[in-house]
Image (tube, rainbow, N blue to C red):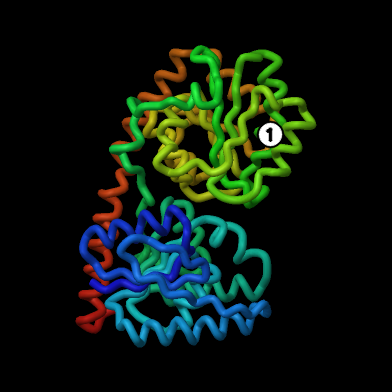
Amino acid sequence: MRIAYLSIGGHIHTERWLGYFVERGHEVHLMTVQPSPIPGVTIHDIRTGIPFKPIHYAVALRKVRSILAAIRPDLLHTHFLTGYGYWGAFSGFHPNILTVWGDDVYLTPHTSFLKNRLARLVLRRADLVTGDSRDILDKSIEMGARGEVCHVVQWGVDLDSFRPDAQSDVRSRLGIPDDAPIVISIRSFTQPYYNIDVIVKAIPAVLETRPDTHFVIAGNEGDDSALRQLAAGLSLDERTHFVGKIPHDDLPAYLVASDAFLSVPSVDATAVSLLEAMACGTPVIVSNLDSALEWVTDGVNGLVVKPGERQELERAILQVLDSHDLRKTFGHRSVEIVRRRADHRKHMARMEQLCVDLVAKHSSGGR
C-alpha cells in the first residue's frame, strides 16, 4: 500500500508506528508541521510560517490537498483529533483513518464551542477510528464517532527490549547505591495535568521515612526547569535526579533499576510508559483514570491513587517500598498482563489488516 500520514513529526509514537509499515514494505509518506527524518519515510513539510491560525490552517490545507493529489495514496491515516485531524477531514480524502491520542479527546474539544464542533465533524467523517483504550473510544463515540468503526489498537510495547531481565548500569551512572530504592517518573513536562509537581512535593515526606530513597524525574518532552527549582526549594538535590529526555532504547535500563514507577495524571489515555514499566516488572502506582484501570487493579498488580492527592501518593510509595514481596507480586502479574495484551508487533499487525480491509472496502465502493 501507499499510505499518507498526517501526524506529529519527531515523536516516538509517530516514528514507531510509521517504522513498522516501512518495515512491512509499504510506501509511507508523512505530512507534518514538525518535520524530522524517519528512515524509509518521505517527509512533506506543510509549515506555512503564518502566525494567524485560521490562515495558517487554510494554507496548510491547500498543501495537504496538493500532496495527496500528487502521491495518490491508497489510504490517509491522520493521527491526533485536533489540528492534524482538521486537515485530514477537510482534505476530503477517503478512506481516512483517524487515531486519537489523549488530550485531543479529553481536553481540547471542550475548551471552546468551535473546537468542539470541529472535533465532532472530524470524528463523523473518519472511515475508521482507533485509540489505545476503550475509554478514549467511548469518549470519541460520545462526540460523534460511529461505534461500529471504532477499534482499540495499542501503541504497544517492544517486548524484546522491555523485559525484567534487561541489563542496566543506571545505578552506577547516577551514583545510586545498589541497596537504595529508586522511584521513577518519565511522564511529559509539557502539561500540568501530568502532576509531576505533585510527585516532587511528595518526595520530602517519603524521605522522612525512607531517607535512602532516590527519585528519578525524566520526561519525553518539555522543559523541567520549574520542577528543578521546586526541588531545589525543598532541598531535594541529593536524592532527586533530573535526567531530562531518556532515549527510548535506554528506557529499559532505567525501568528495571527502579522499585516503583509513577504515572498519576489527571487526564490520560493508555500511557505507553506505564505499559513499558509493567513489561519490565517494575511495580506501578497510577491515578484512578478509566484508561489506567484497564491495566492496573488496585492491590493486585499495582496501587491506585486519586490524581493530585499528595498524601495518598506518599502512602502508596512507602507501601511499595516497604514490601519486597509486594513489589515482586505486582511486577510478576504486570509482566503477564502486558505480554498477553500489549505486544507492539501484534497490534501493528492488526492495524495493518484493518488498513488492508478498509482499502479493499473503499475500492469496492463501500464506506
Q: Where is residue 280 in the image (x, y as percent from the top left)?
A: 38, 31
Q: Position of residue 22 (x, y in %)?
A: 27, 62
Q: Which residue shows up at 57% across the image and 57% down it?
A: 103
Q: Which residue shows up at 60% across the image and 27% down it?
A: 215
Q: Which residue shows up at 26% across the image and 74% down it?
A: 2
- The answer to whether residue 366 of the structure is visible from this angle is yes
Quarter of the C terminus within the rendering: bottom left
Q: Quadrant of residue 296 in the image?
A: top left
- Tell me how many marks there are: 1
**Location of residue 3 with respect to 233 vertically, above or below:** below
Crowd rating for badge 1 (residues with CA inside 10 Å; few <14, some 14–19, many 20+): some
- The answer to whether residue 300 of the structure is visible from this angle is no
Quarter of the N terminus within the rendering: bottom left
Q: Which residue shows up at 54% across the image and 76% down it?
A: 47
In front here: 115 or 175? 175
- Reading the image, the residue beneath label 1 is 309
Element on which disc 1 rests: loop
Q: Position of residue 317 (x, y in %)?
A: 59, 23
